Amino acid sequence: MEGAEEERLVQCPVCLRELPAAHINSHLDRCLQAGEAEAEPGSSPPCKWPRLAAASPGSQAEGEAEDARPAAGLPVFSLFHKGRGGGQSPGAPGRRSGAGREEAAVKPAEGGAAAAAPSGASLAQKLEGKPLAERLRPDTLGDYVGQERVLGAQTLLRSLLESHEIPSLILWGPPGCGKTTLAHIIANSSKKNGTRFVTLSATSAKTNDVRDVISQAQNEKRLFKRKTILFIDEIHRFNKSQQDTFLPHVECGTVTLIGATTENPSFQVNAALLSRCRVIVLEKLSVEAMEAILMRAIRSLGVQVLGQGNQHSSSATGSSSESLEFPVYIEEKALSTLAYLCDGDARTGLNGLQLAVQARVAAGKTTPLNITKGGSVDGILITEEHVKEGLQRSHILYDRAGEEHYNCISALHKSMRGSDENASLYWLARMLEGGEDPLYVARRLVRFASEDIGLADPLALTQAVAAYQGCHFIGMPECEVILAQCVVYFARAPKSIAVYRAYSNVKECLRTHTGPLPPVPLHLRNAPTRLMKNLGYGKGYKYNPMYQEPVEQDYLPEELKGTDFFKERKT
Ligand SMILES: Nc1ncnc2c1ncn2[C@@H]1O[C@H](COP(=O)(O)OP(=O)(O)OP(=O)(O)O)[C@@H](O)[C@H]1O
């Protein structure tokens, strides 16, 4: 009987693991200690790796290994993201083993810029390991640049964050604008009042992972009165049933949800969930904000800024000459070009800077620089060309923010209009490979379908809308072939601008009309009330289906009678 009691399985209230009753007390002690360990700063939002193809593979692999390392010492409970597309999800089948469950614990950021590298380290050492963007991720609102509209001094969000009153939030904004960084700052500040911060990435987490986080949050709340903030990166990638899983728990306050998304949450986030969250719209970082972020990076690396033509007093702290044979300089113009070309994406800007500096330092080629009155100094110089190389794949071919964006879409439009399928494909690829938003191209195709093909092939519009939706569903890179198919269809399609031109003529007619616009003819008016009938509304209207023969009836106002917008030439 006693043996049976010992063998009876009971569930640990903390980790939910089933164990023999006889072992539960000792297990619980370990579990509680582990829970404490987890409360330590291990739960920051995930580290992100550079998206640039040119990013050094070595540094990424190194970073991933570091990122996936479990938090030191005791096993941890919470579920963490392993990084984009990385590895098995934390709660994948076969891995749920209670306290021993394998999790990718995210290491805490190492103190922001100040901790980027020891101040005495050489520049090459400072550039090793984690990507610069990760190391410079701000820890406090003080270092968070831009986004004044939502985080400025008098804003509601700032006062909520300062008072540690975190509501459920959806952070919506383009890549690299600071969504994860903001969550990271919230994680840091919420630790101060003992709140747990758990991170899941919708790209790798399964519904069971969400359930695990929720049940753990319930236990934490019940046993320790601790709140849980759940950060879900790329929340738009969760399907409806996954989103439904945490809906009631957000509602009853078991977890505070912070979701980050680059997609419009009205379409991608379940309406019920959305209504329980405050949507914070973050914008692309301005060129000025990007300059400030890049300057901070320059300072942390000890690189000095070189003004055009004359010596520029750099605000760099600690000259690189302390630890390097040659000082490193970057042209002021190179910085502003980088700030401009990265199109409000701080990760792209910082990665571009890192690659440019790394390449120049590795090449070790020095230039005599006239920066002192007395003569020249040998130093490593980073020019505008070098930063463009750093941004190579994404930005040198194609500048998403600037003129090139309009030039290429115009070239695509004209190539399709000219029925040149090769040129059409070329311009499409130039844009997509350069990082253009596929939905921007898809929207142009919808317009083209009506403007240039029109009724010569009415199916073109259906194709374009389907291509838009396809791109919306699957994103890049898979959607490129959808756009390619549509572009070739359009290049080969017959063209007609009849409707486009006729509609332009109508608009012109309205614009140039002098005096009051003619009233709607009485016989064309609807007459839902007796009064309207009495006023002659609808009187004399011939209901076409009642007639066998063509109906003689005017539909245009009297003064436009007989106008043919299809024949008239636009003036
Ligand atoms: N507002 C900001 N102030 C200072 N640094 C920033 C800011 N926004 C972004 N950064 C820098 O850019 C890097 C990338 O930003 P973050 O990961 O927050 O972007 P994100 O909006 O979450 O992008 P994604 O949608 O691609 O995940 C950060 O590590 C940080 O170094």
Image (cartoon, grey):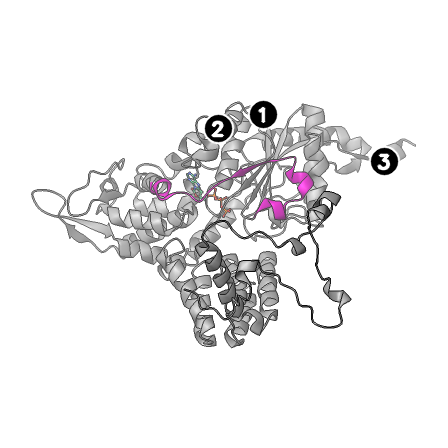
Q: Nearer the viewer, residue 392 or 495?
A: 495
The numbered disc on residue 194 is 1
Q: Would you call the spot at circle 3 few (<14 residues within 10 Å), some (14-19), or many (20 or more)?
A: few
Amino acid type indicated by mark 2: Thr
Judged left or right of residue 145, residue 276 is right
Amino acid type indicated by mark 3: Arg
Q: Dot 2 lies on which element?
A: loop
Q: Is residue 296 visible?
A: yes
Q: Dot 3 lies on which element?
A: loop
Q: Would you call the spot at circle 2 few (<14 residues within 10 Å), some (14-19), or many (20 or more)?
A: few
Cα distance between the residues tagged 1 and 3: 35 Å
Query: Residue extending furthest left?
Result: 374
Residue at the disc numbered 2:
155
- Sequence-earlier tag: 1 or 2: 2
- Res 25 quadrant in image: top right
Residue 74 placement (x, y as % from top left): 60, 35
- Res 319 quadrant in image: top left
Q: Would you call the spot at circle 1 few (<14 residues within 10 Å), some (14-19), or many (20 or more)?
A: some
Residue 163 placement (x, y as % from top left): 53, 22
Residue at the disc numbered 3:
8
In this view, 288 is above or below 422: above
Q: Dot 1 lies on which element?
A: loop
Residue 496 placement (x, y as % from top left): 52, 72
Judged left or right of residue 560, residue 255 is right
The reply to whether callout 1 and callout 3 are in contact (CB within 8 Å) is no
Amino acid type indicated by mark 1: Gly
Cα distance between the residues tagged 2 and 3: 56 Å
Q: Which residues lie in the magenta part? A: 264-291
